Amino acid sequence: MLRFFIVLFSITIISGRAVFGMDMMDSNSSMEEKNFYETIIRESQKYHASSAALSRYLTPYFNQAIRKNDNALLAIYYCLLADQSFDSEGGRNSFSDKYYLKALDLEKNYNYQNVSAWVKVMYGFYLYRCLKASEALPLLLEGEKGLEEIPKDLALDLAHTYKKLGYFFGTLGDYSAGIKYLELGRQQEGISPKFKAEILDNLGLLTLKSGGDTVEAMKNFEIAQNLALSEKDSLRYAKTLGNQARVYEGRGDYQKALSLLEKDLEISKSLGNNKNTIFALMMRIRLRISMGANQEVKKMIRDTEQLLEGTDDKKTILELEEHKLNLAIQNHDLKQELKARRRIEQLQDSLRFLDGDPVLSQLKFMADRQKYADKLSLAQALIKKKRAETRLWVILSLFVLVLFFFIYNAFRYRSRKRMREYEYQLLNLKYTKAELDKELMSSKNQIDEYMVYLRRNNEQIDLLSSMLEERGAASIKDRDELKILLQSHLITDEKWQEFKLLITREFPNLLQDIQAKFPDLTESNLRVIVLMKLGLNNREVANVLGVTPDAIKKSMQRLKKKLGAQAGILMEYISDKELV
């Protein structure tokens, strides 16, 4: 009786730990490993300008990762190579794709949630830079969710990670999320003045786009400008001038905006930075149209078109065509108007498949919906947890009262009775096992009979497991006898081979059909799938195989991930209980 209550109390406490949120979460690297990984990420920036230099720096860490089977370090290695390849080649290329896919594929070989979140943000931001925002969205949302679950002192490269999330959500039009992450990035310790200028410049831009305080936006631009000057970062200085021009444009002070743009253009052209030059030219075109200087606009459009030759910046080309359309309408130039309209229609169709405004709006809606669903799920989980806590305390209180009462009044009597019941149960179980084996031997040509055998086998396993738990500190002989009997009910390799022969005899094509549809299945996978298709649930499969239900569940999760798109087909196949 005492052992019974001790076991019951332990089960209650374990369930209470789960209720109070003490169950184990996905693990992260140790602080020592995190600092090691982060040092490699930070130091690699010094060699980012040259692929050869970066490769030389990272090679010893690659060798270490292979030698120690450190797949997390290997994933970081591939991400750094991919990012450098993208920048050195000026865009997406076969190497950057290959390296990022290798990094993502390694996730199943390590369980560091902080490394996994960093890799997903890196790869998602890479896809965003490749104008594949729809592909980037799920990765960045997963990275964002993972980041929320990681202790901040274990998160990797937090400042740059926040910056990437801020840029992405700002592009989607989710300005509040973009501003939040840029603010978090700015607050990180140890960031360089150059990096801080970049953050502040973009923070001011998102503040402006969101319809926020223009004074606050201008303050961020001015601080970024001063930091850029102190660091001799001419390009960032030029960008801050262009962004300040946006503020003056909004205030209607076109002359001030144009004077700032002239400085921006002068610096951008001297640096040979076509991208920033084009941005400044487009803004100047917009300002001149607002001022009615249409003749000057035509020359600016031609200058911008020359810079855009050979690029794939469809959004800017579309904006230029819209300006050309407005000019054609004003000049009553029907030929140019029709040409501009056709070009606009083609560009709009093309942008529907890239990162045009309709796509970004749809992605923002999807991101908002996913975040709402996550918040709702969390709220429901908290409510459920509170209710469970209340029930748990009531159960614990009642349990303590009942425990003391039964211990005092019935311990000796129960103990003797249990011993007699145990001996009777053991004999009965041995007899039932013999009967089950006898029945099976006499009906091996019937799958239905085997299923009945498995069901009854499960009942015996449950009973034996319960007896083993209840025996507690029983003699070694008693426990060994129970274990031997329990083991005899399990589907061993030998029994499995016998069962396969029975299935092949009854349904000759069943196993070949499964293996043909899913060639990546292991023998262990096949055993679980066949048992499930016969109608056994996770617990029953775990019982007859001698493992825990969690082991079966995790095995199926790994299999689904391995099969990818075929996982749904497998689940439908298992759900269909028709064997032929």
Image (tube, rainbow, N blue to C red):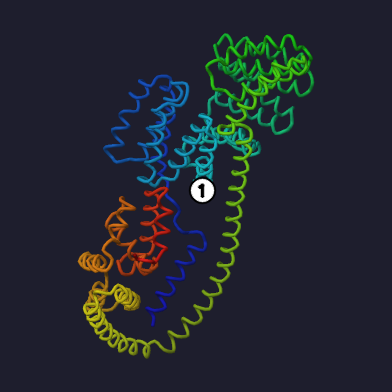
Q: Is residue 566 above or below residue 137?
A: below
Nearest the eye: 166 or 456: 456
Percent x, y of residue 13: 46, 68
Percent x, y of residue 314: 59, 24
Q: Residue furthest left?
A: 494
**Residue 547, quarter of picture:** bottom left
Percent x, y of residue 351: 59, 30
Q: Quadrant of the C terminus?
A: bottom left
Q: Is residue 180 above or below residue 10?
A: above
**Residue 35, quarter of picture:** top left
Q: Quadrant of the N terminus?
A: bottom left
Percent x, y of residue 103: 39, 37
Amino acid at circle 1: Glu
Nearest the eye: 273 or 50: 273
Callout 1: SS: helix
Nearest the eye: 401 or 431: 431
The answer to whether residue 173 is left or right of residue 519 is right
The answer to whether residue 570 is left or right of residue 376 is left
Nearest the eye: 511 or 125: 511
Q: How many callouts does the rendering have?
A: 1
- Mark 1, Cα crowd under 10 Å, few <14 / some 14-19 / many 20+, is some
Rendered residue at 22%/80% (across/down): 442
Q: Which residue is mark 1?
A: 149
The answer to whether residue 1 is left or right of residue 435 is right
